Image: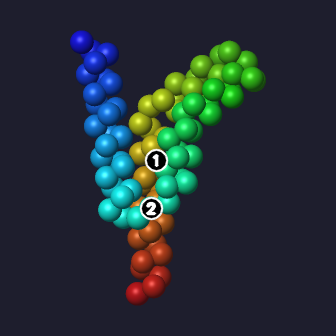
Amino acid sequence: MVKKLIHSEGLMILIAIIYIYSINEFSWWIFLLLLLTPDISMLAYLINNQIGAKVYNLFHTYTISILIILLAVSLSQATHIQEV
């Protein structure tokens, strides 16, 4: 039951992000890159298993996603302030 809940949560977030990207006309190339980033984090296993597991788990949380969103919003606001 918990696994189904986690998967449905992920699906809802994916749908919300696709909607946000479509109404704001963001770059779909960046969307694809960010969508694949958690899987690309598996390359950390080339260093060793311990580091690989930590990096992989970090990128499979919403922590990195939220940090990227906060960075984008703050940079957007800084650019908007400079234009005014």
Residue 45, quarter of picture: top right
> Which residue is situated farthest in the right direction here?
47
Q: Percent position (x, y) of residue 44?
A: 68, 27
Residue at horizontal 42 percent and vertical 77 percent from the top: 80
Instruction: Say left or right for 28 vs 54.
Output: left
Task: Pick whichever, 50 or 21, lies toward us.
Answer: 21
Q: Residues within 10 Å of mark 2 (few under 14, many from 20)?
A: few
Label for residue 44?
none
Q: Secondary structure at mark 2?
A: loop
Residue at horizontal 45 percent and vertical 85 percent from the top: 83
Q: Is residue 51 visible to us here? A: no
Q: Residues within 10 Å of mark 1 (few under 14, many from 20)?
A: few
Q: Is 45 placed above or below 29 here? A: above
Q: Percent position (x, y) of residue 51?
A: 66, 22
Q: Is 76 placed above or below 35 here? A: below
Mark 1 or 2: the one toward you = 2
Q: Is 58 placed above or below 75 here? A: above
The residue wearing badge 1 is: 67
Q: Amino acid at mark 1?
A: Leu
Q: Percent position (x, y) of residue 25?
A: 41, 64
The residue wearing badge 2 is: 26
> Which residue is situated farthest in the bottom direction here?
84
Which image quarter is the C terminus in?
bottom left
Q: Is residue 47 visible to us here? A: yes
Q: Amino acid at mark 2?
A: Phe
Residue at horizontal 48 percent and vertical 29 percent from the top: 60
Q: Secondary structure at mark 1?
A: helix
Which image quarter is the N terminus in?
top left
Instruction: Say left or right for 67 vs 52.
Output: left
Q: Percent position (x, y) of residue 71?
A: 47, 57
